[in-house]
Image (tube, rainbow, N blue to C red):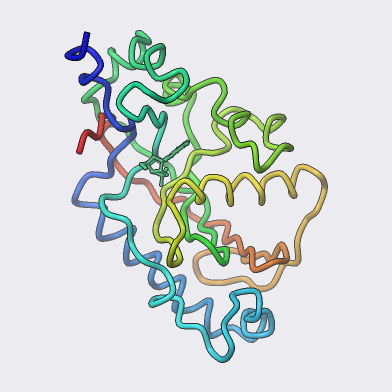
Amino acid sequence: GPLEEMSIPLFFAWFLLSSVQDKVGSTSLDFLKTLQTLEAFKKHMSDFKAEKEVDLEQYFEAKGVLHCTTKFCNYGKAEGAQEYAQKQAVKDFYGSTSELSLSALFVTPRTVGARVSLTEEQLLLWPADAEKEAESVPAAASLPLGSRAHITLGCAEGVEPVQTGLDLLEILALQQEGQQGELVEEMALGSLTFYGKGRWLLSLREPICAPACFSGYYT
Ligand code: ACK
């Protein structure tokens, strides 16, 4: 009935605890600030369809509370939403806190995000078809489970946050095809690689550990 349908959230996710929201947000801003000072970035600025200098801090807009989506349910209307909400692991872990490992930061002309490397236990909450559902990135179907796991840190004007995971999959698919990208620079935070078309990936030397609570988002 309608009451049962209403109990399925817009999406399930790990929500970063407030103590680390600011830390992750400022690490992301520092990265954008540094990136746009690099000559290598300036050289490829036209990928961002900016005529002169692009101010990445202005270019990307934050999208609310930082989280790592496991399943977009659209209140039960999305494919597989009911089945997901009824999974035993979802019930067991609902409301529990675990530590997300942020292993890379990435920037494209559409989004800025963090890659999340899930543990075996966290993968119990990962939908089996999350990577296959990324129709715009066909090669993603053969990537390991959990490859799409990310935190959206910002979106360009007119870009929906669902794009962040697709941008990450695109980069990982290139890596899988053997495209190593162009190692641009060793930064304090880690090594920066360019994959063409405005796609930049910073592999963090020390992953950022972010405690997060698994829950549903309703409003
Ligand atoms: O940044 P995100 O992971 O991308 O978090 C938001 C959240 O759900 C609420 O919109 C994600 N999202 C939206 N649509 C989809 C979709 N079709 N598949 C997977 N994730 C989605 C969005």
Q: Is residue 207 above or below residue 154?
A: above
Q: Which of 205 and 177 is in front in this view?
A: 177
Q: Residue 22 location, x and y as percent? A: 25, 60
The residue located at (68%, 30%) in the rendering is 141
Residue 212 position, x and y percent, is 28, 38
Expressed as whole percent of the image width and height from the top left, the position of residue 158 reads 44, 62
Say which residue appears at 65% left-offset and 43% top-offset: 136
Q: Relative to 92, is 35 on the left or the right?
A: right
Of the 4 image quadrants, the one containing the C terminus is top left
Residue with the most extreme right position = 178
Residue sitting at the far front: 2
The part of the image, by quadrant, that contains residue 85 is: top left
Looking at the image, which is closer to me, 37 or 59?
A: 59
122 displayed left or right of 16: right
Determine whether 193 is above or below 169 in the image.
Answer: below
> Residue visible at 43% across and 67% down?
157
Across and down, in percent, residue 202 comes to 57, 61
Is 5 on the left or on the right of 135, as rendered?
Answer: left
Q: How many labels does the image show?
A: 0
Locate ligand 1 by image quadrant: top left
* Quadrant of the snapshot with the N terminus: top left
State the residue at coordinates (64%, 30%).
144
